[in-house]
Each structure stands twice: as C-alpha cells, then as structure tokens.
Amino acid sequence: MSNKTVRWGLLGAGRITNTFAKDMPLVNNSVISAVAARSLNNAQAFAEKYAIEKAYEGYDALYADPDIDVIYISTPHTLHYEQTRKALLAGKHVLCEKPFVVSPEQGEELTQLAKQKGLFLMEAMWTWFLPAIQKAQQWVREGRIGELKEIQADFGFPIEYGPEKREWNVELAGGCTFDMGIYPVALNRLFNHDEPLNWQITGKRAENGADKTIKAILDYGDRLSILGSSFEYKLPNYAFILGTEGYVAIPDFWCASSAKLFNGDECIETFVDERKGTGFEFQIQHTVDSILAECSESQVVSHEDSLAFQRDIQRILTAF
C-alpha cells in the first residue's frame, strides 16, 4: 500500500486550516482533494489558494464524497463531536483538532465508534510530534536528567474580553483551559502516564463564567506538575522537565523548535530542529502512514491519551 495516495477533505477553512494546507506539500503519499466551509465563497477561495480540486458549501457533500479517505476537522471545539461522528458514520478516517471534544463521555463514544468501524481517529495534538519534544522525551528516557521530579508548563497570552468572541463564548466551550490549557495538560501527560494522587487547582472566571486564568498543581507522590493557562496576561509559555541531575528547557513548547539540556546551571546540549514547514507536517505524515498501515489508532496519540486530556480538563474546570 506504500504507493497509495491518501486523499484529504478539509472541514473548515479558517486560520488553522491554512497552516495545515501550507504544510501538506511536505507530506508523502498525501493530497488535499476537497475543502468544505459554511460559505461556498470561502471554500472556493481556499480551494483556489491551495489548488484544491473541489469546494463544498456545507459539510454533507464532504462526508458523502467517495473520493475522500480522511477528513481533517478544524472548527470550534463544540462542533467536533457531531462532525467527527458524521465523518466516521460516512466511513471516513478522521484527524480532529484539539481539544478533540468537550467531555470525556463524547470522547468515549467517538473512540468506540471508530473501533467498531475500523477507522483511524486521532486528536491533532501536533506538539507531541515535534522533533524538539521528541528529543526531550529521548533525553528523559536515557536518564540524562536523572529521576523525573517535576513538570512545569504554561501557555497563555492576553485576549481582549468579549463574550461573543469564540475564545470567550461559553456556548462554544470558551475559556482558557480548553483553548490554551490543553497544551500544558497534554505536555504533562506525555511524561506522566499515571493518575495524580492529589490536585490543587485555583482559577479566575470572567463575567460570563468563562475561565480566564488557571493554575493546577498535580501531586504524584514522588513528582509534581505545575500547569497554567491564561487569557488575562502573557505567560512564559515554557516547559521545564526537572530531574535529580538536570533539566530540559523548551521555549514556546506548544510549537517547539528547540530544546536545551542542562546539568546544574550548565547547558550541555542544545537541539534545534530543521523543519521546513510550520510543524503540522509531522502529525499529517503520521496520520497518512497510520492509514496506509491500516491502523485504527495512533501509536503516538492514543485514544486513551485523548480521554485522559478530557478527564484532566474536566477536573480543572469543575474545581473553581
């Protein structure tokens, strides 16, 4: 099957879909065959920009298109469940933007449906595929920082308040935890697979009830994790993986292009990736390779990983 081309349909034509389309030329055995948007004009403009053969108004035609193998979903969080469900019922593989859904129950239903249908389904946690993040994992696995003791990760920057804005709109699962907190939550889960013994969570909410700043301390007994996100102010957006003999520092970890390994105060190794694209190309290639290998689940971002993200987010949001 290695010479087969996987044909993509894009569901949504917004900013993040542009990033996806820009990185597609860097992916092997892969082509975008169609794009669907609420507005036909938007779909046609997107199709013309990226030389995509077909443009659809609305999404039903995309689900029904027999020439589409996999659908990439990049709409607001609250639409992901229904759109992923329809795509799977139509026999399409799915790569769905994070957060994959807005409750653990939705996630359970969709992962079960994908398994029943024998279809590949993955949350687009692109951070996990970045070379700098994978290098950090390698350093930790090799014992370069000694015994893992603490994860620190935060992601936030100010977004002007407006209850009608997508980021703040509670009807669209607005708030910093789903929008930005998913990144530190996922980074923590990459290194801590077990469940915390204790949580300490504090947060602030906007006038409409949307969460605007959160801090969470997770106690694993022999380890701690300190996670944060905010719509109120700029956070460092760093990840630190701390051990008994050293630590790893990753600037802008959510889109990481570099990582540094420290022993005490001394930087003993620096990794800088040489990617040609934005960084989406790695998760796209993984999806394509998984589909061609007839996998129903990713070996990197598993269904259980995505369900764990949802459980952690719900724990945070219900604590304050």
Image (spheres, rainbow, N blue to C red):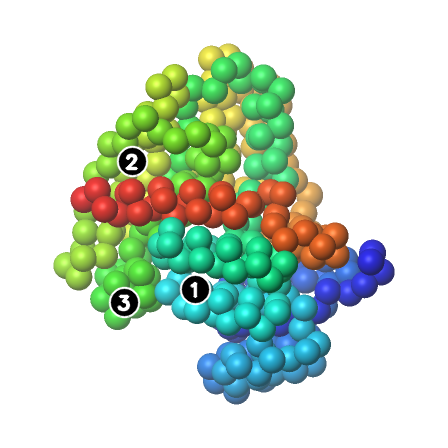
Q: What residue is shown with label 1? A: 81
Figure quadrant of residue 155: top left
What kind of residue is marked 1?
A: Tyr
Separation of marks 1 and 3 at Cα, in angstroms: 14 Å
Figure quadrant of residue 107: bottom left
Q: Are marks 2 and 3 in contact (CB under 8 Å)?
A: no
Q: Quadrant of the C terminus?
A: top left
Chain-order first, disc 1 or disc 2: 1
Vertical comparison of 52 with 75: above or below: below
Separation of marks 2 and 3 at Cα, in angstroms: 24 Å
Numbered label attached to residue 216: 2
Q: Residue at x 58, y 73 (%)?
A: 90
> Which tag is nearer the camera, tag 1 or tag 2?
1
Chain-order first, disc 2 or disc 3: 3
Q: Give coordinates of residue 21: x percent, y percent.
A: 62, 66
Q: Give coordinates of residue 233: x percent, y percent.
A: 28, 47
Separation of marks 1 and 2 at Cα, in angstroms: 27 Å
Q: Quadrant of the N terminus?
A: bottom right
Q: Give coordinates of residue 289: x percent, y percent.
A: 72, 53
User: In this view of the protein, can residue 47 be seen by the observer?
Assistant: no
In-front residue for pair 275/68? 68
Q: Residue at x 49, y 43 (%)?
A: 305
What kind of residue is marked 2?
A: Ala
In-front residue for pair 53/101? 101
Task: Tell which residue pokes out farthest to the right in this image.
Answer: 3
Q: What residue is shown with label 3? A: 171
Chain-order first, disc 1 or disc 3: 1
